Image (tube, grey):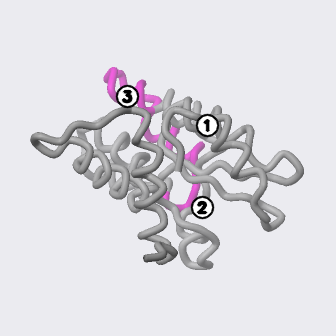
Amino acid sequence: AWFQDNEQLVNWVNNQPFDSVLNCVGDGHPGIWNLVQTFNPQGKTKQILDWFHLVENLYKVGGSLKRIAQGKQLLWQGKVDETLALFLPLNKKAAQNFCTYLQNHRHRIINYDYYQAEGICAIASGAVESTVKQIDRRLKISGAQWKVDNVPQVLKHRCAYLNNSLSM
């Protein structure tokens, strides 16, 4: 684990043995995808938009629940063009924002149904986000004082604990 040291993170990732394709799941934040583009330079990297972030953005459109359900089903199958056809005719700003979001991430939207059924990889980043929130809560314990320089050591201990490799 690294804190504010992307270069070390990228070096570590790129020294891991990969299968022919490295699947990377993330939300829509460009900083994540900028990092992912530096991973696995000798192989192929598949960028996957987190299913729950995708659906969260879909629900921001509001309006017809039937249309939202149709959009969700189409996206579950990775059908971006069909989903765009449902929402592009709408004049609402939220719908237009969602269409822009889909167009920006279309190459990251997979057939989630297939990936999940085949067990290819995770389709959501919730487990990672949950761990980050746990660490964040520990760093904000009332009365605790943390130095930025000590955070990487805390992260290393937490990772070792979660990987059952903490030696006593």
Q: What span is colored magenta in the figure?
A: 76-98
**Pointer 2: what residue?**
111
User: For the point 55% across and 30% down, which residue is it?
Assistant: 30
Tell me which label, 1 or 2, sits earlier in the chain: 1
**Pointer 3: what residue?**
90
Q: Position of residue 58 (x, y in %)?
A: 36, 43
User: For the point 61% across and 37% down, which residue is it?
Assistant: 33
Classify residue 142 as left or right of residue 107. left
Amino acid tagged 1: Trp
Above-or-below relation of 131 to 32? below
Name the foreground residue: 4 vs 95.
4
Classify residue 69 as left or right of residue 3. left
Determine crowd level at label 2: few under 14, some 14-19, many 20+ residues with C-alpha closer than 10 A.
some
From the viewer's perspective, is the residue at label 1 or at label 3 nearer?
A: 1
Amino acid tagged 2: Asn
Determine crowd level at label 1: few under 14, some 14-19, many 20+ residues with C-alpha closer than 10 A.
some
Name the foreground residue: 76 vs 92.
76
Mark 2: secondary structure: loop
Q: Position of residue 47 (x, y in %)?
A: 65, 48
Q: Position of residue 72 (x, y in %)?
A: 40, 55
User: For the point 23% across and 38% down, which residue is it?
Assistant: 63
State the quadrant of the C terminus.
bottom left
Residue 67 in view of the camera: no
Label 1 to label 3: alpha-carbon separation: 29 Å
Tell me which label, 3 or 2, sits earlier in the chain: 3
From the viewer's perspective, is the residue at label 3 or at label 2 nearer?
A: 2
Tell me which label, 1 or 3, sits earlier in the chain: 1
**86 in magenta:** yes
Mark 3: secondary structure: loop
Mark 1: secondary structure: helix
- Cβ–Cβ below 8 Å for labels 3 and 2? no
Label 3 to label 2: alpha-carbon separation: 25 Å
